Image (cartoon, coloured by chain):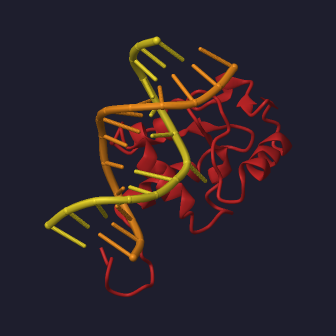
Chain colours: A red, B yellow, C orange
Amino acid sequence: MGQRGLRVNMCSEFEKRVWDLVAYIPKGKVTTYKELARAVGLPTATRAVGNALNKNPHPIRVPCHRVVKSNGEVGGYAGGEKYKTELLKQEGVDICNGFVVKFFKILHTFNK
DNA sequence: ACGACGGCCCTCG
DNA sequence: ACGAGGGCCGTCG
């Protein structure tokens, strides 16, 4: 796409896929970076997913705070891990010691 | 074109 | 439980 061209609308297909998927995570539920990577067709691109979320263009539509690590840890957040944890708790997600407790709430299936 | 850098993941000790 | 080390991959300088 336009990586060097206009500074407007600079986003890759990869990023769009990630953002679109995250946009459909219901309130109170979470998924993982790993699951997202798998869903976009690049199962090992977990770090790249984190990068994409870090550039979240529209936090309202794309609730990137609902994406956590695969081991249950809350994980990073542009606004700070602490704030991320608060947001999740506020949505009803049980968190203890930085870990998501109700792990079974994670959405494991995303279809392209 | 190339190397560094992440909101990561996995395997060992 | 916890850290270290290697791997992975899209982005940005």
Q: Residue at x 44, y 60 (%)?
A: A16
The C terminus of chain A, quarter of image: top left
Q: Which residue is drawn at 33% across and 42% down?
A: A41
Residue A43 in the image: x percent, y percent?
Answer: 36, 37
Residue A31 in the image: x percent, y percent?
Answer: 59, 37
Q: How many labels does the image show?
A: 0
- In the picture, residue A101 is in which quadrant? top right
The N terminus of chain A, quarter of image: bottom left
Residue A71 in the image: x percent, y percent?
Answer: 59, 27
Vertical arrangement, residue A19 with respect to residue C4, above or below: below
Q: Which residue is drawn at 63% across and 48% down?
A: A76
Report whether residue A62 is seen: yes
- In the picture, residue A25 is in which quadrant? top right
Residue furthest right in the image: A90
Q: Is residue A77 left or right of residue A52?
A: right
Q: Residue at x 46, y 49 (%)?
A: A49
Vertical arrangement, residue C11 with respect to residue A108, above or below: below
Q: In this view, does A46 lie to the left or right of B7?
A: left
Report whether residue A20 is seen: no
Vertical arrangement, residue B1 with respect to residue B6, above or below: below
Residue B9 in the image: x percent, y percent?
Answer: 47, 31
- In the picture, residue A80 is in which quadrant? bottom right
Q: Looking at this view, is A18 or B10 the one in front?
A: B10
